[in-house]
Image (cartoon, helix red, strand yellow):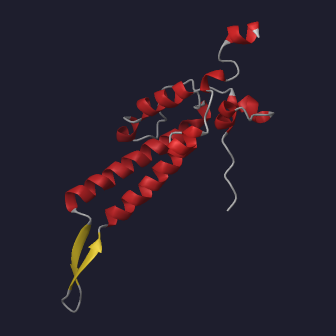
Amino acid sequence: MPRKPKPSHLKAVTGTTRGKAAETAKLRFNGANPPAFLSDRAAQHWPELADLLSDMGVLADGDKTALALLCEAICEYLDARDTVQREGATYSAVTEAGATMHRAHPAVAQRADAARRVQSLLSEFGLTPSARSKVQGLSDLPGDDAAKEYFS
C-alpha cells in the first residue's frame, strides 16, 4: 500500500516545503465559527479543537470541513459508547429452534467504526503521538515573526 502524502501544514513545520506546498502552508485559520451543517452536539467540540489546532499553526480556512467531520465523528463515538454502556455489549436472541444466542450489539461496531474515523482524522491534523513526533518547529513558520524575517 502506498504511503499517504504528508499534508502541507505538516511539511511546513518539518521544513520540507517547496513550491506550492510552501504557499499553502502559509494559510491560517481566520474563522472561529463552525460550518452551518454541524450538529449542535458536534459544535460543542469545535471551539476546543479549533483553538488547539490554530495554536499549533496547522489549521487553515480550507480545513473547516475536515474539522467538522472530526467533531461529528467524536459525537458518533460518544453516542455509540453511551449506548453500549446503557444496553450492554451483547444482546440475547432466541433462534427458531428455541436456543438462546448471544450477539454483539450493533452499537459495538458503530463505536469501533467511529473510533477508527476519529483516529484517522486526529492523525491528519497531527494530534496523535506518532503524527506529533513528525511535527517540529511550529513557531518557525514563514511569516509568523516579521521582526525575525527583517533582522535575518
Residue at image point 24% right, 86% down: 95
Q: Position of residue 35 (x, y in %)?
A: 49, 35
Residue at image point 26% right, 52% down: 82
Q: Position of residue 127 (x, y in %)?
A: 51, 39
**Can residue 33 be spotted in the picture?**
no
**Can residue 120 be spotted in the picture?**
yes
Q: Is residue 47 left or right of residue 58?
A: left
Q: Is residue 72 left or right of residue 20?
A: left
The N terminus is located in which quarter?
bottom right
Residue at image point 21% right, 92% down: 97
The C terminus is located in which quarter?
top right
Q: Is the residue 140 above or below the residue 18 in the image?
A: above
Which quadrant holds residue 145? top right
Q: Position of residue 47 (x, y in %)?
A: 42, 29
Q: Is the residue 113 above or below the residue 100 in the image?
A: above
Which residue is farthest right?
19
